[in-house]
């Protein structure tokens, strides 16, 4: 059904933030495969490589997967998930603010834009520090 | 000469676990000062899981024990120290694949771990992170034919004190900038316990 669109993974330290960003997007966009990987294994504040890998598997339709993340260890666990995941073409939206970036990425994925096109658009909101 | 056997590697993990559990409050307090206050909990949880895992498993090599520890830490720690220590132990494991652990091989494994932490955290020496302590250990192993491992502990201790005078530029602490002055880096402290535990189990000799 949604097989022609780039998948998105929302990675946050907080399950509430992850779910909140998801909710924000879902109000507008329903045709894009999106999964949340937020909090540790036992839903404490933190990130989990396993959750990220599971989320990648969930949204990977062969059109590429973009990982959006928040602070600190989220990036490191996302990079490890890319290394250990079986999916090809998984990329990190590096230095992109989570809420705005996820929203833009979802809108563009819904238009059928490619992973590279989405990353180019996100460059406009790149942070110098994160 | 073999300085670390499979059994000693398991003991190393147990000795680390004891120290993380005993110093949980201290690590948490350090992280409360310049981070988010979860480092003690992260470390205790991570190494408890490591010990649970290795106690129930038979291993053929030191590399396999280290790999098991690496995977468990990556999965269970939750904070930055999870992927960082996970990467460090994984790189050690890879460097020791099909090898017995003599001093030369161990040195190479530490070098690999150091490169792994650098790659994962994008850290340099002097940024007030655990990298500083691993760097010091690598330096120590490069410069001498170790006869007294206690000297390594002393070198680590000095590095921990050095982090007090540094401004953090990586990790959660970096948001506090100059406010991190005067505080010891929690990850450097936990790395100290890792090497203190090592010295408790490792053999002396070449
Ligand atoms: N980029 C980095 N490079 C090297 N070491 C780092 C880096 N970021 C953090 N650290 C080390 O990790 C320690 C903090 O570990 P801890 O388990 O508390 O993670 P955290 O900072 O709470 O993680 P998170 O980013 O998920 O909040 C720091 O004291 C520091 O030594
Ligand atoms: Mg912390």
Image (cartoon, grey):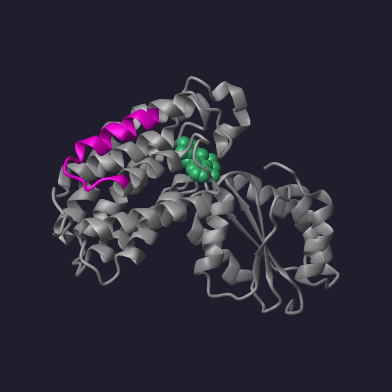
Q: Where, by quadrant of the figure, is residue A89 drawn?
A: bottom right
User: The N terminus of chain B appears in which quarter of the rendering?
Assistant: bottom left
Residue B144 percent across, percent down from the top left: 26, 45
Q: Residue at x 14, y 58 (%)?
A: B7
Check if residue B152 falls in the magenta segment: yes
Q: Residue at x 69, y 73 (%)?
A: A64
Q: Is residue A44 visible?
A: no
Stretch of the chain drawn in magenta? B143-160
Q: Nearer the viewer, residue B7 or B92?
A: B92
Residue under the point 29% across and 38% down = B193
How many marks on residues? 0
Which quadrant of the rendered structure holds the C terminus of chain B? bottom left
Q: Give coordinates of residue B31: x percent, y percent.
A: 46, 30
Q: Which residue ends up furthest to the top in the rendered image?
A: B182
Asked whether B206 or B26 is in front, the reply is: B206
Q: Main secondary structure of the magenta part?
A: helix
Place residue B191 in its image quadrant. top left
Residue A99 appears left or right of B131: right
Q: Looking at the image, which residue is at 39% across and 38% down?
A: B41
A14 relative to A49, above or below: above
Where B29 falls versus A127 (above or below)? above
Question: Does B76 sit left or right of B63 as displayed?
Answer: right
Residue A118 image offset from top left, x and y in percent: 80, 64
Examine the rendering and report whether any part of residue B185 can be seen. Answer: yes
**Quick check: is B33 in the magenta stretch?**
no
Query: Percent position (x, y) of residue B105?
Result: 27, 61
């Amino acid at each position: 059904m949604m097989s022609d669109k780039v998948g998105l993974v929302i990675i946050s330290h907080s399950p509430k933030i992850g779910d909140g960003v998801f909710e924000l997007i879902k109000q507008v966009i329903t045709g894009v495969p999106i999964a949340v990987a937020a909090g540790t294994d036992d839903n404490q504040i933190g990130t989990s490589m396993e959750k990220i890998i599971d989320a990648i598997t969930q949204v990977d339709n062969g059109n590429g997967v973009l990982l959006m993340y928040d602070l600190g260890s989220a990036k490191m666990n996302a990079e490890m998930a890319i290394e250990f995941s079986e999916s090809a073409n998984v990329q990190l939206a590096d230095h992109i603010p989570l809420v705005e970036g996820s929203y833009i990425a979802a809108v563009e994925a819904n238009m059928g834009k490619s992973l590279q096109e989405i990353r180019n658009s996100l460059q406009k909101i790149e942070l110098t520090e994160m | 000469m073999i300085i670390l056997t499979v059994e000693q590697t398991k003991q190393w993990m147990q000795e680390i676990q004891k120290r993380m559990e005993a110093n949980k409050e201290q690590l948490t307090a350090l992280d409360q000062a310049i981070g988010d206050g979860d480092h003690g909990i992260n470390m205790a949880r991570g190494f408890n899981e490591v010990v649970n895992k290795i106690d129930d498993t038979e291993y053929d090599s030191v590399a396999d024990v280290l790999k098991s520890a690496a995977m468990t830490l990556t999965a269970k720690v939750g904070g930055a120290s999870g992927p960082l220590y996970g990467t460090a132990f994984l790189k050690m494991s890879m460097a020791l694949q099909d090898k017995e652990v003599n001093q030369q091989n161990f040195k190479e494994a530490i070098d690999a771990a150091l490169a792994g932490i650098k790659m994962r955290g994008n850290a340099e020496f002097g940024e007030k992170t655990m990298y500083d302590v691993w760097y010091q250990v690598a330096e120590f192993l490069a410069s001498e034919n170790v006869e007294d491992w206690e000297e390594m502990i002393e070198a680590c201790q000095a590095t921990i004190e050095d982090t007090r005078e540094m401004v953090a530029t990586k990790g959660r602490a970096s948001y506090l900038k100059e406010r991190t002055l005067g505080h010891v880096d929690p990850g450097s402290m936990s790395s100290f316990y890792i090497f203190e535990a090592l010295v408790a189990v490792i053999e002396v000799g070449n």
